[in-house]
Amino acid sequence: MKHLLGIENLNKDQIMNILETAVSFAEINQRQIKKVPTLKGKTIINFFAEPSTRTRTSFEVAEKRLSADTYNIAVSGSAIQKGETLADTALNLQAMGPDAMVIRHSVSGTPQLLTEIMDCSIINAGDGFHEHPTQALLDAYTIWQKKGGFEGLKVALLGDIYHSRVARSNIYLLNKMGAHVSISGPGTMLPKEVEKMGVTVEKLPKYAVQDADIVMMLRVQNERASNLLYPDVREYSRYFMLTPELLKLAKKDALVMHPGPANRGVEIDDVVMDGEQSVILEQVSNGVNVRMAVLYLLLGGADK
Ligand code: CP
């Protein structure tokens, strides 16, 4: 594998290889000195053309712990603001000889385009509505660590599915690994013919959550919607927020997950978000392990 553009084109063995590799990096991340020379001499550019806290920081932490040289670029402060095209920006960055570029962009397909004009490895850190592969991998790692596997698990995926690249990547991944995904959200937030992705669609969250092993909430992505997709926030919360009462319908040991950032009190109640079943901050910690594994596997690192 040279690039990581999405989960759709990965097979089960490739996914398991990434998760198993992440275990050894989890061990390194427990050490007092969390740094190994694995990617010494490699140059990685993080190009985030959309806001990010978790993904951008955890890629940078992962790169630095692997001893790579890292450089961060945002649209603000780059020559894109002076009218340079993304392709010209990419060609100029390529001319500096990076080994990899981590890219987040609001336009679906941008990472794919970069593989056609750049020589280095391209890692998709979230593109438009399309995919967010490292998020799905860190979610899978969290589930695998907590549940011991995927086969037969019921995963309730709730909220704004239509705008969610996290949803798409998770549906691809969980289906490949043998879990069953039940989705629920307002009709305006469900993609057309989503059943064809191999999920069960429920009108109300209570049916999706019933006996679920995992309840994964998604953020309402107002920034991607051209019109308001629900009458008002109170209506949305009334029918679609993950409350303690709704969570009671899931299995007693169900995990509560959310990719973040979360709209507290809109899609998830504070009590649930901060509750005992929540593994939301563990997802973030696991993101470093998984991103170290992805970088190691793509860039052919030496000793761990
Ligand atoms: N989950 C996620 O992609 O979060 P950020 O937008 O903070 O990177």
Image (cartoon, rainbow, N blue to C red):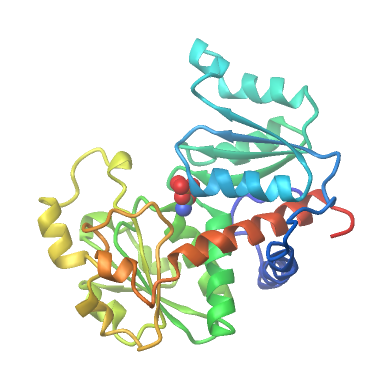
Q: Does residue 150 sit above or below 71 in this rendering?
A: below
Q: On the image, which quarter does residue 223 sit in?
A: top left
In the image: residue 36, left or right of residue 286: right
Of residues 80 and 114, the one drawn nearer to the viewer in this rendering: 80
Q: Quadrant of the C terminus?
A: bottom right
Residue most toward the front?
32
Question: Relative to 74, is 19 above or below?
Answer: below
- Residue 212 at x, y = what percent? 37, 83
> How many numbered marks appear?
0
In this picture, residue 118 sits left or right of residue 210 = right
Residue 75, horizontal then vertical, whole percent: 51, 25
Residue at image coords 64%, 43%: 60
The residue at the point 25 percent across, 60 percent down is 267
> The N terminus lies in which quarter of the figure?
bottom right
Residue placed at 53% from the left, 57% from the top? 135
Q: Is residue 279 visible?
A: yes
Residue 199 appears in which quarter of the rendering? Answer: bottom left
Q: Is residue 39 left or right of residue 218?
A: right
Q: Is residue 108 left or right of residue 91?
A: left
Q: From where the camera sits, is residue 130 visible?
A: no
Q: Position of residue 58 (x, y in %)?
A: 59, 50
What residue do we see at 52% from left, 72% from top?
A: 174
Specify the farthest residue to the right.
302
What x and y, as percent, mark residue 142?
54, 71
Relative to 38, does residue 27 appear above or below in the rendering? below
